[in-house]
Amino acid sequence: MTGLKVGDRMPDFQGQDQNGKELSNRDFTGKKLVIYFYPKDNTPACTNQACSLRDSYGELKKAGYTILGVSMDTEKAHTKFIEKFSLPFPLIADTERKMIDAFKVWGLKKFMGREYDGIHRTTFVVNEKGIITHIIDKPKTKIHGEEILNLE
């Protein structure tokens, strides 16, 4: 559910991770990047997704990927989430929705007959030149790490 497509350049972005460290697209120049957007820390599907990426982290890193998660949660919430589940990658606290809007992953959602605006769970795989090579619109949260590894 994004307005971006494979072949597009990754949008410019900057945001703060759980430690308050400023990260931007320039920090990932020359690197393969997996940037995943998710609704909320400590919810069942988001936890499954993060833990799948954690469990596949060694293989993803070996394949040359850097992992970056993004949600609207605060730095403090991200820190607790990372500590609770031993996540080895940074999470951006996009509380002002700048990255979420740049990647066009905000929009109408439906859940149990209710409609509301929120983050569409979406993963972007970006090559060393900053070009989006894959978009996973509906990640399989429990096997998301394997899902990315199988794209190659």
Image (spheres, rainbow, N blue to C red):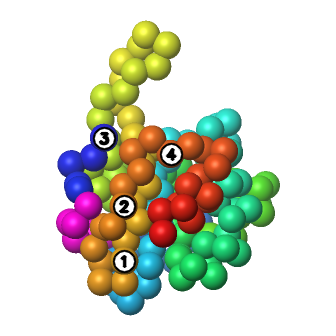
Sequence-wise, the earlier of marks 4 and 3 is: 3
Sequence-wise, the earlier of marks 1 and 2 is: 1
Quarter of the image holding residue 119? top left
Return the residue nearer the eye: 93 or 12: 12
Residue beneath disc 2: 134
Write down the region rendered in magenta.
6-13
Return the residue nearer the eye: 14 or 103: 103
Main secondary structure along the magenta-highlighted residues: loop
Sequence-wise, the earlier of marks 2 and 3 is: 3
Residue beneath disc 4: 139
- With 20 as the anchor, is 137 left or right in this view? left
Q: Residue 134, position in %: x, y?
A: 36, 61
Residue beneath disc 3: 1
What is the CA distance from the residue labelled 4 to the residue labelled 3? Answer: 12 Å
Residue beneath disc 1: 127
Residue at screen point 61% across, 78% down: 61
What is the CA distance from the residue labelled 2 to the residue labelled 3? Answer: 13 Å
Q: Residue 55, position in %: x, y?
A: 73, 62
Does 11 appear in magenta? yes
What is the CA distance from the residue labelled 1 to the residue labelled 2? Answer: 9 Å
The quadrant of the picture occupied by the N terminus is top left
Sequence-wise, the earlier of marks 1 and 4 is: 1
